[in-house]
Image: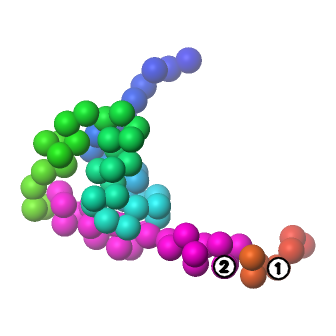
Amino acid sequence: MSSFRQTTLERAYDLARSGSCRTVGDIKTRLQAEGYEGVKDRLYGASLTAALRKLCAEHYVCPDAQAAATQSAPAGD
């Protein structure tokens, strides 16, 4: 079994694309909860913050909207 762990930056981009983080602050909170250290130091800078913010805006799915879509989806074929 591999003990590979993504870097803080790689994980931040994955979280931004996942649709579960609405803001860069959400990403930082999740990273800290996952045990990443020095999150604020590694996710610093206007360009990086802007890129993560843009990905969050493009991919974020509101939990209420996701639940409503799941409930209104027709049963399997």
User: Which sits earlier in the primary sequence, circle 1 or circle 2?
Assistant: 2
Q: Which residues are magenta?
A: 48-70
Q: Secondary structure at mark 2?
A: helix
Regarding residue 28, the answer to whether it shows in the image is yes
Q: Residue at x 10, y 55 (%)?
A: 45
Q: Residue at x 87, y 70 (%)?
A: 76
| Image disc number at residue 74 | 1
State how many labels appear. Answer: 2
Q: Residue furthest top?
A: 1
User: Which corner quadrant of the image does residue 5 belong to?
Assistant: top left
User: Which corner quadrant of the image does residue 68 belong to?
Assistant: bottom right
Can you say which quadrant of the picture contains the C terminus?
A: bottom right
Q: Secondary structure at mark 1?
A: loop
Say which of 7 and 71 sits in front.
71
> Is residue 54 located in the magenta-colored stretch of the structure?
yes
Q: Residue furthest left?
A: 45
* Residue 11 locus on image (x, y percent): 36, 44
Q: Residues within 10 Å of mark 1 (few under 14, many from 20)?
A: few
Three-letter residue code for mark 1:
Pro
Can you say which quadrant of the picture contains the N terminus?
A: top right
Q: Is residue 32 left or right of residue 61?
A: left
Three-letter residue code for mark 2:
Ala
**Vertical placement of residue 49 versus 61, above or below:** above
Q: Residue at x 38, y 48 (%)?
A: 30
* Residue 61 locus on image (x, y percent): 50, 71
